[in-house]
Amino acid sequence: MNGANSLIRTLVGHGVDICFMNPGTSEMHFVAALDDVTEMHSVLALFEGVATGAADGYARIAGRPAATLLHLGPGLGNGLANLHNARRACSPMMNVVGDHAISHRRYDAPLQSDIETVARNVSAFVRTAETTQGLGNDAVAALAAAFGPPGSVATLIVPADVSWTDGGVVVPPSGMRLAGTGGTRPDEAALEAAAAALRSGERTAILIGGRACAGELLDAVAAMAATTGAILLAETFPARLERGAGRPPVERLAYLAEFATMQLEGVRHLVLVDAKSPASFFAYPGKPSDLVPPGCTVHTVSAPDSDVTAAVAGLSALVGATAGTGHRQQATAPSLPAGALTAQTMSQSLGALLPENAIVSDEGNTSGLFVPGATAGSPPHDWLCLTGGAIGQGLPVAVGAAVAAPDRRVVALQADGSALYTVQAWWTMAREGLNVTTILLNNQSYAVLNMELDRVGVEVPGPRARDMLDLTRPCIDFVRVAEGLGLQATRATTAEEFSDQLARALATPGPSVVEAVLPSRL
């Protein structure tokens, strides 16, 4: 068999059976091999940023890597923003990037580039395959890096002649552990110090991220908080947060530094569980970047490469926490609103209608500020956040989540400005028949940047500055765009229309768009 065939067979043998792709000439032998290895489910994206974001969303839900197939350095570059988000999410994924044949390198063809340098920006592992016989082992090394811990982006660059040459070797499964499991043993002294802080009676907060935001780990941390009286917070943008009725209620650290400072005011000890010490997203004139309160001691009990399960178990034992004793969110649902459609009434409708076991891919930005509160008591669901802050994640991550969990309803809470970065994802949703309902929040502006313009000290922005944050002239017809890409789409201008359209979309199999026309100001 040729190298491409052995590569796909090796990936499938190690549990990687999804590949999101936008291929080119150098990847044609990989594409041809898909008919020989039918266990690999290939998903076509019209833009590389959709493929990379989809692999991120898949990993967050499935807990294992998907592959991407990208064309040369420019193709990898087109996917870089969502690879940045995936890196911040510690999502395990593997990029297969085609390259010119080794024999062709010396000609410096128009698409020749330094792919490894591009890849290192976002990848924990980068390797260029040099032989067909060694390609399978290269793939296994990349997967080992992707699985982690921490889960990571791994990039394998495959020259075209390495793919087309015969002599490929399939490497059998090697018993890799699940993504994010295992890791370095916890520091006993750090656990003792954190336990002493939690038992001290001083104001203490537990800040969770990553793996601690779901399942048994979330339950165990909630029990520690209830036992010790600590405040329980999550990072601003966790990769995946389990929430809703019957689950531990967790308040996320605010995006705005001023509000985060209020949440942490008076905290004397901050215990980090798979989370980073909080910092402001941006620097502002006259405002601190470090959000840790003065006089507060930070205790790191689990870093991304740590065995978080062992760390949480050890800390739980030291503070005497019993599993299942943490607080639980009560089931509540807002009533369906009437009247004007605003960010608040849109949030009420979603809180009233969100189905059980849904997955929310949240890139609602400013118009989505009220949604977490409105959905806190909704049926149990997962919340996927914009981990790295690079917009254009919401729709691709929804694609990947829906591929990973085809029987669950995915809701893409999507702001209008960032939707336009990767709107091609709608075509992939239609092509694959994915159960994704997009709520398109249309306030006809980059509203978050209007807010940031004020916060950086521009007291009276001029008309030219405001014009650069405006999405009119012409207004974008999202319904026609969605229909042109193969989706059912409707537009709501009142709260009643939105509730009716959303209810029908959530009850209808396959992808759809409900555009919520909102005021340009919150």
Image: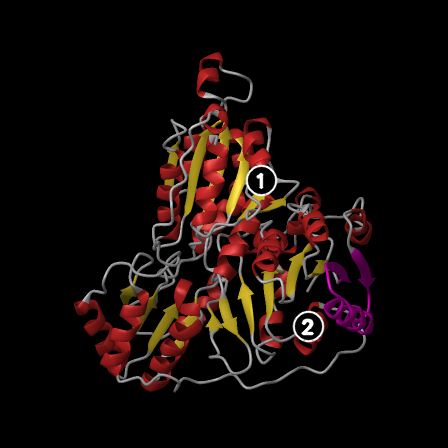
Q: Is residue 390 visible?
A: no
Disc 1 target residue: 34
**Rendered view: 341 above or below 425:** below
Specify the quadrant of the image occupied by residue 365.
Answer: bottom right
Residue 497 part of the magenta-drawn span: yes
For residue 222, above or below residue 207: below
Earlier along the polypeptide chain: callout 2 or callout 1? 1
User: What's the residue at 28%, 58% (across, down)?
Assistant: 183
What span is in magenta? 488-517
Q: Is residue 469 magenta?
A: no
Q: CA distance from mark 2 to mark 1?
A: 40 Å
- Seen at 66% across and 76% down, the residue is 351
Name the residue at 71% across, 45% down: 467
Position of the C terminus by quadrant: bottom right
In the foreground, 445 or 163: 163
Residue type, mark 1 in image: Leu
Q: Nearer the viewer, residue 153 or 416?
A: 153
CA neighbours of label 1 inside 10 A, class few (<14), some (14 to 19), many (20+): some
SS at badge 2: helix
Q: Amino acid at mark 2?
A: Leu
How far across and how far down the image is residue 63, in percent? 46, 59
Identify the residue at the far left of this view.
189
Percent across and percent down for residue 300 are 28, 64
Q: Which residue is mark 2?
A: 350
Q: How is the image coloured?
A: secondary structure
